[in-house]
Image (cartoon, rainbow, N blue to C red):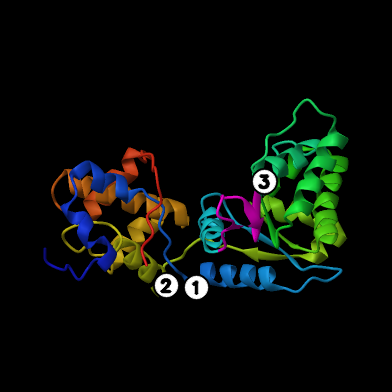
Amino acid sequence: MSCPEHLHPGVWSYLDDPVEERVTRLYMPKWVAYARGDEALARMEHLLRHPSCGRMPCMLLYGDSDIGKTMIVEKFVRDHPDICNEFGEVEARKVLRMQMPPKPSDGKFYAQIIGALGNPVPYSKRSADVELLGLRLLHRHPPKLLIVDEVHHLLAGSVREQRQSLNQLKFLSNELRMSVIALGTSEALYAMQTDPQIASRFEPFALPRWRESAELRAFVASFGRLLPLEKPSPFADKHMIQKLLAYSNGLTGRITTLLAQSAELAIRQKTETISIDLLEQAACAGIYKLPAQQEEVVT
């Protein structure tokens, strides 16, 4: 097999796979470094390594839906796995990731924590009992960092319920002396700013939409190197970048999805390269991602 220079070396062997396997690989999660994402990861790393103190610094990572928050967090969580013994039991936990419940309440909040810790959630118990159980489990193997996704769900509750959930984040940070990273849409910023104490503790970090730039072209080219196509694609072409930007509205997730969909068309139509025509076909077809069973890691 030849070594196609337009592809990452870790992708070369995929060119020999059957069509359906190549197509499935297109939709496996991939991490492509870019400046704003790397800066977010660096700040998260700083929080993870911050020494314990009475007022731990926290962070709010926010941006539009599909802007790439999940991609960044998944990369961070992958890089900081739990430390387990020979029996697979957790001995030390670096990062705990959970979701804010769709409607905020103390009981549902701690139920999410219990589930994230890998324990069955006692739905039949009283809210206070669920809270105590959650705290006991957290103290057993306290994480260095708590990541709470979908923080904008706070706005689904009353002002009182919002304050309660925000106070729980502050309480956990104080109780376990750990930093908290909250994720959400721009609405999450509004929710956090309703409480001055929370707003002062959670430093906001925005993920803006992409604009036409050298950085965007570099990001697209890097992502393209992970797509197992036999021929190079004109990712440096200004017209293609403009089309991609227009169809994606500058959203990172939509950009990568369009590229994967276009690559699928290139494989099935045997062109083996992404053209503007295929990009337009993919944009018109809508989202039709294939289910991914595992993650593709390319180093």
Q: Are marks 1 and 2 in contact (CB under 8 Å)?
A: yes
Q: Are marks 3 and 2 in contact (CB under 8 Å)?
A: no
- Between 3 and 283, the residue placed more toward the observer is 3
- N-term mark: 3 or 2: 3
* Apparent side of residue 294 relative to residue 270 in the rendered image (left or right): right
Residue carrying label 2 = 215
Tell me how far mark 1 sits from mark 2, CA to CA.
Answer: 8 Å
Identify whether 123 is placed above or below 56. above
Residue 264, horizontal then vertical, whole percent? 25, 46
What label sits on residue 117 in the rendered view? 3
- N-term mark: 3 or 1: 1
In the picture as drawn, the residue positioned furthest to the top comes out as: 124
Viewer-nearest of discs 1 and 2? 1
Residue carrying label 1 = 35
SS for callout 1: helix
Q: Which residue: 75% across, 31% down?
A: 122
Tell me how far mark 3 sits from mark 2, CA to CA.
Answer: 38 Å
Residue 98, horizontal then vertical, whole percent? 66, 47
Viewer-nearest of discs 3 and 1? 3
* Apparent side of residue 288 relative to residue 79 in the rendered image (left or right): left
Residue 30, horizontal then vertical, whole percent? 40, 57
Res. 273 in view: no
The boundaries of the magenta stretch are 80-97
- Count of marks overlaid on the render: 3
- Between 289 and 238, the residue placed more toward the observer is 289
**Label 3 environment density (alpha carbons within 10 Å; few <14, some 14–19, many ≥20):** some
Q: Which residue: 87% across, 69% down?
A: 54
**Label 2 environment density (alpha carbons within 10 Å; few <14, some 14–19, many ≥20):** few
- Between 113 and 87, the residue placed more toward the observer is 87
